Amino acid sequence: VLNFKSNASDCFEGKVVNTDFTLRLPANLVLHQTVERIHVGKKYGDIPRGIFVVRGENVVLLGEIDLEKESDTPLQQVSIEEILEEQRVEQQTRLEAEKLKVQALKDRGLSLPRADTLDEY
């Protein structure tokens, strides 16, 4: 068992920030006092998550946090409610843009393959 102070990011959209975690071979992570950080534009919000277990194969990036450098970022910290609302608006905007793109392709006789149609390959 190894103890570190660092930062862990995994596959889902967002960042899990933690300053104390335990690494157990084969690279599974048990995070304590974990915070999920959501970024939208130049704003971010932290959501406390508590104990968090991450399977080793889901870890994409693991590294130390430079606390001095983190405090110098141009990002603005906002409340949980505000960042969740901004995230919802951004996702809605992205969804509407995707619908317009699909409709424009349909109007031209083209289509985008859906992800579930490619499962057999």
Image: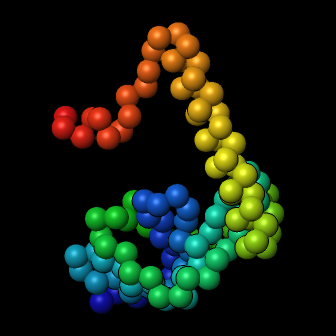
Name of the residue lying farthest toward the left:
120
Horizontally, is 99 left or right of 85 in the view?
A: left
Image position, residue 104 (x, y; %): 59, 18
Task: Tell which of 58 and 96 is nearer to you.
Answer: 96
Count how many numbered circles sit on residues in the image. 0
Horizontally, is 10 left or right of 100 in the view?
A: left
Task: Tell which of 60 and 64 is nearer to you.
Answer: 60
Q: In the image, what residue occupies the spot 24% across and 80% down?
A: 25
Location of the N terminus (image quadrant) = bottom left
In this orientation, does residue 71 appear? no
| Res. 30 image quadrant | bottom left
Q: In the image, what residue occupies the spot 31% across and 73% down?
A: 55
Q: In the image, what residue occupies the spot 57% across and 23% down?
A: 103
Task: Tell which of 56 and 40 is nearer to you.
Answer: 40
Image position, residue 78 (x, y; %): 80, 69
Q: In the image, what residue occupies the spot 19% across and 34% down?
A: 121
Image position, residue 38 (x, y; %): 64, 64
In this orientation, does residue 52 appear? yes
Task: Tell which of 66 and 51 is nearer to you.
Answer: 51
Image position, residue 47 (x, y; %): 64, 77
Please tell me whether residue 111 is drawn above or below residue 94 in the rendered image. Answer: above
| Res. 3 image quadrant | bottom left
Please tell me whether residue 36 is drawn above or below residue 111 in the rendered image. Answer: below
Please tell me whether residue 99 is drawn above or below residue 2 in the rendered image. Answer: above
Scheme of image coloration: rainbow
Please tell me whether residue 87 is drawn above or below residue 79 in the rendered image. Answer: above
